[in-house]
Amino acid sequence: MFLRMILRAFLRQWKKMAMIAFTIALGSSLATAMLCVMMDVGDKVNQELKTYGANIKVVPKDASIINELYDTDGENMSGAYLREDELGKIKTIFWAFNIVDYAPFISTNASLNGGDEVTVTGTWFNHHMELPTGETLDAGVVSMRSWWEIIAGDWIDEQNGDDRDVAMVGKALAEANGIKVGDTIDLKGSSGEKSLLVSAIFDAGGDEDDQVYVYLDTAQVLAALDGKVDSIEVSALTTPDNELAEKAAADPSSLSIAQKETWLCTAYVSAICYQIQEVITDSVASAVRQVADSEGEILNKTQLLMMLITVLSLVGAALGICNLVTASVMERAQEIGLMKAIGAQNPSITGLVLTEILLTAIIGGIAGFFAGIGFAQIIGHSVFASAISVRPMVIPIVAVLVFIVTLIGCIPAIKMLLGLRPTEVLHGR
Amino acid sequence: MKKRKMYMRMITASLLRRRSRMIVALLAIAIGATILSGLVTIYYDVPRQMGAQFRSYGANMLFTAVNDTFSQEDVDNAVAVIPESQRVGVAPYRYETVRMNDRPVLAAATDMEGAKSASPFWRVNGDWPSADGQLMIGKSVASLYKLNPGDKIEVTYTPVIETENSSSDEEALEENADEEFILDNYIDFEVVGILDTGGNEEEYIYMTLNDMEKLTGKANYYNVCELSVSATADELSVYADKISEGVEGINARLVKRVTQSETTVLSKLQSLVLLVTVVVLALTMICVATTMTAVVAERRKEIGLRKALGASDKSIIGEFMGEGLLLGFAGGFLGAFLGFLFAQGVSVSVFNSSISFRPLLLPVTIIVSVVVTGVACLIPIRSATDVDPALVLKGE
């Protein structure tokens, strides 16, 4: 009988039920979309902030200071270098997945076209790597120097260019020497000579404007430094620092075992630095504060902002659902009055109304959940040009939210219904 | 006149008598209006607030000298081009090679307060130099010299003998000939802080401008000036052009890495907030509309009864719409203020700064609420007036 009553209610009043379901669907889609976006916004914004370039710099131990302090004329006399064959190891550390990009650099001086000495930097442009894990990675300055403006020509394309004797020339240097794209420049280093084809002129808005960028091996030939690199810049997705991370960065040995575990298992920039140092022989990896700290700042703010907006929309959705449920239950005063008049008990009326509404809520909530995922994807694709991943945690949150909100919405209405006097209602008072 | 009075009385009496339903409706509209005004306020404020956060990336404009150096007056003239409200930090730098323990070190002198605000990412272990005789040293220098905060160190500088300017050439030559006669300037410094930036700054030592003046004997002389300006990339390039053309001796450049990246990320963030606002608003407005529809649909019987008593469709629609619009107005008004309070709360807790009230948002919120309620009411009223009153009264 109970089932039949409910079934009849759905069949007879399908329009009204559809409207309740629709509103609940709206509310739950709103909640789902906002929760999905909020939980993923950290990763997405982190990815965007990679345009600021590397947040970790790896240099050889000890020699780094002497080299940069005294070696003002660029003669590489310090003799301390990192090994090129170890570069792949960076992608094998525990936090390999968080390392989105990296590039090695080697700088040397060479005379340009038999004239002035210029700084020549060898690096990766869009180096393709097959990792031991089976993954592939395209890394290099094309993505790590996204703010460079190519004035003429094109970026050097490592994967497509058979000719490795090419170079990119900084704007200031090109203007001073009248170099154009397509010209050939002769570079004479301390131990080698190369004739390179200029493939692009770039404007970096910094010191690089006076330099020549070439393939890593070209620079190594010029300086007779086979298989060696000066420094490595690493771009990693990190968690903003907290007290523990600062303590660890100052001195990893000051931590207790439990603390150290937490530290190593969180993607703090200091933890990633520590692990890089372990795989690269004789290296010092340090956080580039300008990028690392600012990233944390902006990430935290964005997440907090999105969280508050999410809370507002959740409250809005909850009140909206609540309201409609109240309105639509109150509307049925007459029907309930009649039921009471013919002897229905309060508990059975409550049960009937609740079951009806909750059934509707389940249907609406599920429909809304999927619609919400759709909305989240729209936001993800149009803002970040990538899909927003749906955390499993969203499902229980939305389910509980819809359930509780619907119940709360029913309470005032049911209270009112139970207080009804059948005669009055049927009279229409 | 009398008719209008009666109309108003009917509407208000109807609202008052059906209090619980009307509260439900009013609440629904107010929520919608709150979300509208709150999110729109945040949307308009995000670029400004977030832009300020992005200043933590440090300087986005550089002044370099056209001929080697420039003076404080040049800096003042150039800085005057940028409105004061947009200046976050101005740090003029002067670089010299000095010696510590007879080893050359690059020394920078600057206005410490300016440097602090222009490069907020600098981490100082210890204190910033606040008085003369205090020195901040980069991390690499500190480990090379094994110095800690509190240690004392002597910094020496050999003044350049400008032979051509000297009044007596003979004397100058004599001094050059015998190095013993060139007196080194030196200052005993106390190391107060160690600078950790992860960049080249770690290889410098930092002192106040006063100390540098004492050490070198030359004043009012800068090599570079770093500026942190809270402005969009377009505004910045306008300022840079103006300064390079208008101020003699200074060449203003943008730090491309910072300006370019900021534009990219900030525009993404703004479009994120915009899209979220649109989705949330659309869903909430539909939600408000369905609630209003439910509230009005309940009164089909009343409409039928009135029709049966001879009321015209027009007067029924007029009356119900009047009620709806009044609710819409009240809800919109309430929501506009609640929304502002919410936006204020967000701004204070996220960005630690307050938001200014946008007067335009008040009428916009009210108009949107009135329109949404109006449309939401019209649908059920229409369907009720369109049918035969007998059918409505019978409940079919």
Image (tube, rainbow, N blue to C red):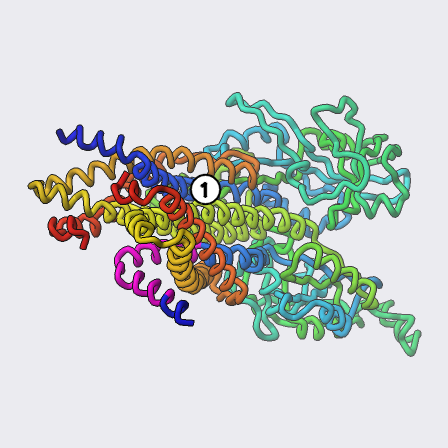
Residue in the foreground of this view, choosing between B280 and A304: B280
Marks counted in the figure total 1
As drawn, B150 above or below A256: below
Q: Residue at x 10, y 42 (%)?
A: A347
Please state the horizontal and vertical placement of residue A298, each as a whole percent of the image: 52, 52
Tag 1: amino acid: Val
Please state the horizontal and vertical placement of residue A309, each as a whole percent of the image: 43, 52
Please state the horizontal and vertical placement of residue B62, each as a whole percent of the image: 72, 59
| Region rendered in magenta | B7-35
Q: Residues within 10 Å of mark 1 (few under 14, many from 20)?
A: many
Residue in the foreground of this view, choosing between B245 and B199: B245
Please state the horizontal and vertical placement of residue A414, each as a whole percent of the image: 18, 48
Residue in the foreground of this view, choosing between A4 and A139: A4
Mark 1, residue position: A37
Looking at the image, the residue that sits furthest to the front is B310
The answer to whether residue B33 is magenta is yes
Residue in the foreground of this view, choosing between A285 and B266: B266
Q: Residue at x 79, y 71 (%)?
A: B182
Badge 1: chain ID: A
The answer to whether residue B122 is magenta is no
Name the magenta segment's main secondary structure: helix
Viewer can see residue B146: no
User: Does residue A254 appear to the left or right of B173 in the view shown?
Assistant: left
Name the quadrant containing residue A261. top left
User: Does residue A236 appear to the left or right of B64 in the view shown?
Assistant: left
